[in-house]
Image (cartoon, rainbow, N blue to C red):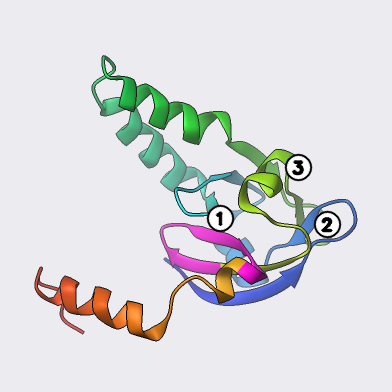
């Protein structure tokens, strides 16, 4: 399970240091893709295979399924960690998430999200998270 928050900066070539704690669980190669939110997601191989299997299990005869599969898979890129613990974030993925330089990596269970620092800081207010938590408590969440 991935958790924790780390701030880093991309270098001039678009490379990002992956925190050692995350690298231990991810291994040397993993997948980065777009998210439904304005961020990127890192999946280890096992989680990525499970996610793509769930996508493949959706009915193929609907436009929505094809668009969803297209969104996630066309933007996916397998990346490898170099000797300095960095990955190269492809330019198209950086553009999709509005990432220029400063980023926040956030462990969120089965994946890691990569946010531009500005988007992360403006993501959600305490008031909004309290409203969401109250709603989820009505659905059985216990905090």
Q: Secondary structure at mark 1?
A: loop
Q: What residue is disc 3 on?
A: 91
Q: Give the main secondary structure, helix, strand or loop, of the magenta stretch.
A: strand
Q: Quadrant of residue 116?
A: bottom right
Q: Is residue 75 left or right of residue 2?
A: right
Q: Is residue 124 above or below residue 36?
A: below
Q: Nearer the viewer, mark 2 or mark 3?
A: 3
- The mark that comes first in sequence, 3 or 1, is 1
Q: Is residue 28 above or below residue 123?
A: above
Q: Quadrant of residue 7?
A: bottom right
Real-space CA distance between mark 2 and mark 1, rounded to the nearest whole angstrom: 25 Å
Q: Are marks 2 and 3 in contact (CB under 8 Å)?
A: no
Q: Position of residue 47 (x, y in %)?
A: 42, 47
Q: Which mark is residue 39?
A: 1
Residue displayed at 73% across by 42% down: 90
How would you rate the neighbour count of disc 2 (Cα within 10 Å): few for under 14, some for 14-19, many for 20 or more? few
Real-space CA distance between mark 3 and mark 1, rounded to the nearest whole angstrom: 13 Å
Q: Nearer the viewer, mark 2 or mark 1?
A: 1
Q: Can see residue 104?
A: no
Query: Within the magenta stretch, is there residue 113?
Result: yes
Q: Position of residue 135 (x, y in %)?
A: 17, 73
- Which stretch appears magenta? 106-118
Q: Is residue 28 above or below residue 103?
A: above
Q: Is residue 103 left or right of residue 5?
A: right
Real-space CA distance between mark 2 and mark 3, rounded to the nearest whole angstrom: 21 Å
Identify which residue, 74 or 62, lies in the foreground.
Answer: 62
């Amino acid at each position: 399970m991935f958790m924790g928050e780390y701030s880093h900066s991309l270098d001039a070539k678009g490379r990002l240091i992956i925190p050692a704690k995350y690298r231990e669980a991810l291994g040397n190669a993993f997948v980065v893709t777009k998210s439904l939110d304005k961020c990127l997601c890192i999946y280890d191989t096992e989680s990525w295979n499970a996610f793509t299997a769930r996508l493949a299990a959706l009915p193929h005869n609907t436009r929505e399924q094809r668009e969803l599969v297209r969104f996630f898979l066309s933007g996916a890129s397998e990346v490898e960690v170099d000797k300095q613990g960095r990955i190269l974030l492809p330019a198209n993925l950086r553009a999709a998430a509005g990432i220029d330089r400063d980023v926040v990596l956030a462990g969120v269970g089965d994946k890691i999200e990569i946010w531009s620092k500005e988007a992360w800081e403006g993501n959600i207010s305490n008031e909004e998270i309290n409203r969401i938590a109250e709603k989820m408590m009505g659905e059985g969440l216990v905090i």
